[in-house]
Image (spheres, rainbow, N blue to C red):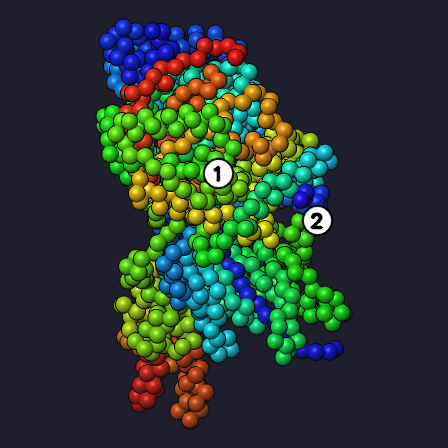
């Protein structure tokens, strides 16, 4: 085993911008419609059709640029990227080549407690292609089918600098970018619906070497996991190839989710020559500073700001604040709890332990929860006033997560309320003591264990509903009162 | 006078005075069309049934305003809802659009009645209409000669009295040159004056919709209707449309008219030079000030045009891929073959040649030398015009270097054919309005002079052209269909 | 100068045109002579000249983000050469 290698990673992320209509026509962008029902002659590439630019698309692109600390140049324009593919109806994609809407920028990631700044090269607007599906079994069918509902959906392609050095950093970048896009309200970032997609440029070089190695581009990464796994695989493949004296070929590869390998997409076709040229059907954009300032003024709270707020205003640990600000729905949940419940750390603990565990178990987003932040607050208040124990609360919470029922109702139906009423408990305690004169004797002779025995018996008799704190207090009082 | 010899305004008076009905008018034109078409072959599709139905509805309403009940023809590059639109190409032989062009729709909304679709060079690429995949159209002045092109069907139909007026498109002279060859008025408005929506694109930064008519008043009437901002065409300009008939005052006193010396060289027929010089003297006699000027980069316009136009065309024509409409090769076993075979069977030679040329000019390694260079030359050409227009109101030149040539005479060397555009192409490169107006006969064939105006100053073209028309009889010349 | 057959084949592949041997030969000659004519531009000094991309002094032509009904499916698909399950059918992409 020879040299040590360094991995160099740059990511190209395609985010679907959250507009109601497509980039260049007024068709709906809603996900999941029947094939070819959200199309018109423009987005189906019919003869004589012309694009008209969606204002919202431009505003969301500018907003993203501001959130990513990019420069928004005064002039930007569109270009045609030419290639033939059945899901690309005009056989060119309207994109931006040399004058993109955002130039430069950065975001900060945390890995192993260290902050690292990842540079952003550019972000440009473009239109999505349609969807190509194989008819029947991929290995035997001679045909594919084209649905153009997605064709013309507005995208922002965000290109990073090759600043990442591990799969973990790439994942952290992607997570951070996603949280910024979500907080800025520019994209839904639903990876499973394809509204956030990622291509990874990966190369390796011996540690200490200045020049980059030859890179490959892996497409089709539609989860954080596949991003991480594909980079690990691809880097290992390249290292092994170099060790074996092979040359790395600059090429496009695809991630095979099933076999967990990257595979070359090389075909005998020509090397791509996209023949970019300025789109003559669209006048250029002049982006005034007033426009940029107006958009900046309307910027929602971004993850960094929210994190600082959680630390400074509520005294949350950095770690908690970072987790809560990964997703605006999550933060919103926290903020709503905190508006009627003062112990922020306790709320945070519950969100990060119980809530997160159940969300992960059920593969759900927080937005899909069937209960409200006020319901969690209610549970916390019930613990505080002694109505339920901490242990019961977890059971109630899980039941509430699953059924969406109000906590009081769950407690009532399951008869889970805690018995704190002193006269009830005194009756119970006195009965147990009278039934066990021998143990009482032991207790009086100084056997500490006897106290524990009484508590156990009381809890058993109350089916666990006796408030342990109150039981402790009362039991001590009863045992020390001399008449026993 | 017979109906087919009358102008729009004369026909309108007859309808308004109830001398004839719209149905009678349409029927009389169809009789004329049926009688002439075997010789002329200007129409690709005749919409008799639809037209007569529309005419009857007009008569039923009984209100004759503007264009109500006036027949017209459209170059077969204008998409027509429910009416086959071929662009004179086999690839669109059976294409039936589900939408109307904005220009065509505006005419129909004003009560105009479409009689049919007119022949052209395939995808507007040609100067003789011989590049039509279906038929050659003859020049009504001499049936052995071409009508010019690419809008040859429109020019021939208006000249022969098959329609009172027609729309065409002009990318490098495709309205003005055939208007000159056929002895009719042909106007290419300023780029951006008329919507291109629903007009099958050839070269998007050069294409412009325009008018063929018998006289200047008709031309102004039609432009009044089709000009103006269209929200569906981002390059149509939001400028007020003046009433162009208000410029028809017959007055040119004090008007400054320039004639560029370069337009009287470049292989222009001596008799044409003389004819146009006589027209200039006429303007002078009417009180205009005429002077010779130089447009020094004129000789570079044609080579630059033959890079810019094919480059844009190579992208515009890429959508004809046999997937969503148009000719499809069903034998092909893979997608690349399906594209290549469908396109090769569907496109004619000239179209293939220009797609190849444009693809080459945009391809990696040649972009700067060809495409970018041509765009810089385009700037120089536009600057030439700006300088002249700082001192002059109008530029006058011959429209074409020769009168109509014989069918089959120029089908060999493509470059020879391209030379026909040498006097018209610079106007498209600069985006200016240009008009061809009959100004005499050479060997019994009509000759046009070209009037070039400032951007969006069609008014001055109308003013000068109308004054010329009032003082001459060339607009009253009518061909006798036969062979010279 | 004529293009090489290799160049013609490369361009034809980019443009998705299937050319016969004879067409390749003709295009090699014709494109060569047109490009030779275009080489006339090379002699012209364009140092410092801004390429003319947009002839109109127009910027920011934008549309509001309001959904309008698209085409009826059977209408937009009516010109398709080959359909299945309301989708365009093409040879398989590997």
x then y, percent, for residue A267: 69, 50
Q: Residue at x 43, y 48 (%)?
A: B379
Q: Is residue A427 left or right of residue B482?
A: left
Image position of A292 with respect to B85: above or below: below
Q: Residue at x 24, y 34 (%)?
A: B254
Q: Is residue B148 left or right of residue B166?
A: right
Please identify the quadrant where the N terminus of chain A is shown.
Answer: bottom right
Disc 1 is placed on an element classified as: loop
Image position of A408 with respect to A283: above or below: below
- Tell me the crowding category of disc 1: few under 14, some 14 to 19, or many 20 or more residues within 10 angstroms, Cα based: many
Q: Residue at x 53, y 47 (%)?
A: C41
Residue bearing mark 1: B203
Q: Chain of mark 2?
A: A
Please identify the quadrant where the C terminus of chain A is shown.
Answer: bottom left
Cβ atoms under marks 1 and 2 closer than 8 Å: no
Residue bearing mark 2: A268
Disc 2 is placed on an element classified as: loop
> Which of the labelled discs sits on residue B268, or is there none?
none
x then y, percent, for residue A425: 32, 75
Q: Is residue B310 left or right of residue A188?
A: right
The residues tagged by marks 1 and 2 sit, at their Cα atoms, a distance apart of: 32 Å
Task: For residue A461, say whether it is visible.
Answer: no
**Badge 1 and badge 2 both on one subunit:** no
x then y, percent, for residue A148: 50, 40
């Amino acid at each position: 085993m020879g040299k040590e290698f360094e991995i160099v990673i740059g990511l190209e992320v395609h985010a679907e911008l959250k507009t109601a209509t497509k980039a260049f026509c007024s068709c709906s962008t809603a996900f999941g419609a029947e094939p070819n029902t959200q199309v018109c002659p423009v987005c189906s590439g019919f003869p004589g059709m012309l694009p008209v630019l969606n204002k919202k698309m431009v505003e969301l692109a500018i907003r993203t640029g501001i959130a990513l600390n990019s420069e928004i140049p005064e002039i930007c324009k569109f270009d045609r990227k030419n290639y033939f593919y059945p899901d690309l109806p005009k056989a060119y994609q309207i994109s931006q080549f040399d004058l993109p809407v955002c130039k430069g920028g950065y975001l900060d990631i945390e890995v192993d407690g260290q902050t690292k700044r990842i540079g952003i090269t550019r972000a440009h607007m473009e239109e999505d292609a349609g969807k190509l599906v194989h008819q029947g079994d991929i290995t035997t069918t001679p045909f594919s089918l084209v649905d153009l509902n997605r064709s013309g959906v507005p995208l922002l392609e965000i290109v990073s600098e090759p600043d990442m050095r591990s799969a973990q950093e790439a994942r952290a970048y992607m997570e951070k970018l996603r949280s910024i896009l979500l907080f800025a309200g520019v994209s839904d970032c639903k990876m499973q619906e394809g509204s956030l997609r990622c291509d990874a440029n990966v190369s390796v070089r011996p540690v200490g070497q200045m020049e980059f190695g030859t890179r490959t581009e892996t497409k089709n990464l539609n989860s954080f996991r596949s991003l991480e796994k594909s980079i690990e695989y691809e880097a290992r493949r390249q290292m092994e190839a170099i060790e074996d004296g092979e040359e790395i070929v600059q090429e496009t590869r695809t991630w095979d989710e099933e076999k967990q390998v990257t595979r070359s997409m090389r075909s005998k076709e020509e090397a791509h020559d996209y023949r970019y040229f300025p789109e003559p059907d669209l006048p250029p954009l002049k982006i005034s500073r007033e426009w940029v300032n107006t958009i900046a003024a309307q910027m929602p709270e971004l993850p960094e700001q929210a994190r600082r707020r959680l630390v400074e205003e509520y005294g949350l640990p950095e770690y908690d604040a970072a987790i809560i600000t990964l997703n605006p729905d999550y933060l919103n949940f926290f903020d709503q709890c905190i508006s009627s419940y003062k112990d922020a750390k306790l709320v945070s603990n519950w969100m990060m332990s119980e809530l997160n565990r159940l969300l992960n178990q059920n593969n759900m987003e927080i937005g899909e929860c069937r209960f409200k932040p006020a319901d969690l607050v209610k549970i916390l208040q019930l613990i505080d006033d002694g109505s339920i124990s901490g242990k019961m609360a977890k059971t109630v919470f899980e039941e509430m997560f699953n059924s969406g029922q109000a906590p009081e109702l769950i407690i009532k139906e399951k008869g889970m309320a805690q018995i704190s009423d002193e006269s009830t408990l005194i009756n119970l305690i006195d009965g147990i003591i009278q039934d066990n004169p021998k143990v009482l004797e032991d207790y009086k002779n100084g056997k500490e264990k006897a106290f524990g025995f009484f508590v156990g018996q009381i809890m058993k008799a109350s089916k666990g509903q006796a408030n342990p704190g109150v039981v402790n207090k009362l039991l001590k009082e009863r045992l020390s009162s001399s008449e026993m | 006078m017979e109906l087919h010899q009358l102008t729009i305004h004369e026909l309108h008076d007859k309808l308004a005075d109830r001398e004839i009905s719209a149905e009678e008018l349409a029927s009389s034109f169809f009789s004329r069309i049926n009688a002439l078409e075997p010789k002329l072959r200007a129409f690709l599709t005749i919409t008799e049934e639809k037209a007569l139905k529309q005419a009857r509805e007009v008569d039923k309403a009984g209100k004759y305003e503007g264009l109500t009940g006036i027949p017209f023809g459209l170059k077969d590059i204008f998409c027509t809802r429910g009416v086959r639109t071929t662009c004179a190409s086999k690839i669109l032989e059976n294409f039936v659009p589900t939408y109307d062009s904005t220009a065509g729709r505006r005419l129909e909304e004003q009560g105009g009645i479409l009689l049919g679709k007119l022949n052209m060079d395939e995808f507007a690429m040609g100067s003789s209409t011989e590049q039509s995949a279906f038929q050659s159209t003859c020049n009504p002045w001499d049936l052995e000669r071409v009508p010019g092109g690419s809008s040859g069907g429109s020019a021939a139909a208006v000249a022969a009295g098959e329609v009172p007026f027609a729309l065409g498109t002009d990318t490098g002279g495709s309205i003005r040159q055939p208007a000159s060859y056929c002895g009719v008025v042909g106007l290419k408005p300023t780029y951006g004056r008329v919507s291109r929506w629903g007009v099958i694109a050839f070269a998007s930064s050069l294409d412009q919709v325009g008018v063929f008519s018998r006289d200047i008043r008709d031309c102004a009437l039609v432009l009044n209707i089709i000009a103006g901002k269209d929200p569906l065409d981002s390059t149509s300009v939001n400028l007020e449309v003046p009433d162009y008939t208000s410029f028809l005052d017959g007055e040119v006193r004090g008007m400054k008219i320039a004639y560029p010396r370069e337009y009287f060289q470049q292989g222009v027929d001596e008799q044409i030079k003389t004819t146009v010089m006589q027209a200039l003297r006429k303007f002078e006699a009417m009180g205009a000030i005429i002077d010779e000027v130089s447009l020094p980069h004129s000789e570079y316009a044609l080579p630059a045009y033959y890079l810019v136009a094919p480059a844009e065309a190579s992208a515009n024509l890429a959508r004809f891929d046999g997937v969503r409409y148009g000719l499809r090769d069903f034998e092909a076993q893979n997608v690349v073959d399906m594209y290549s075979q469908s396109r090769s069977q569907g496109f004619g030679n000239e179209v293939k040649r220009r797609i190849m040329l444009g693809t080459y000019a945009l391809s990696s390694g040649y972009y700067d030398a060809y495409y970018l260079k041509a765009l810089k030359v385009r700037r120089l050409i536009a600057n030439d015009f700006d300088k002249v227009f700082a001192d002059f109101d109008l530029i006058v030149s011959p429209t074409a270097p020769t009168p109509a040539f014989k069918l089959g005479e120029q089908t060999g060397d493509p470059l020879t054919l391209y030379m026909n555009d040498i006097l018209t192409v610079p106007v498209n490169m600069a985006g200016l309005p240009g008009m061809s107006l009959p100004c005499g006969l050479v060997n019994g064939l009509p000759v046009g002079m070209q009037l070039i105006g400032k951007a969006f100053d069609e008014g001055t073209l109308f003013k000068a052209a109308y004054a010329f028309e009032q003082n001459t009889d060339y607009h009253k010349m009518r061909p006798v269909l036969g062979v010279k | 100068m004529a293009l090489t057959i290799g160049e013609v084949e490369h361009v034809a592949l980019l443009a998705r045109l299937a050319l016969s041997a004879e067409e390749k030969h003709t295009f090699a000659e014709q494109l060569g002579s047109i490009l030779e004519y275009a080489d006339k531009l090379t002699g012209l000094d364009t140092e410092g000249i801004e390429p003319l991309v947009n002839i109109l002094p127009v910027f920011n032509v934008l549309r509001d983000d309001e959904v309008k009904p698209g085409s009826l499916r059977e209408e937009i698909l009516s010109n398709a050469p080959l359909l299945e399950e309301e989708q365009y059918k093409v040879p398989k992409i590997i």
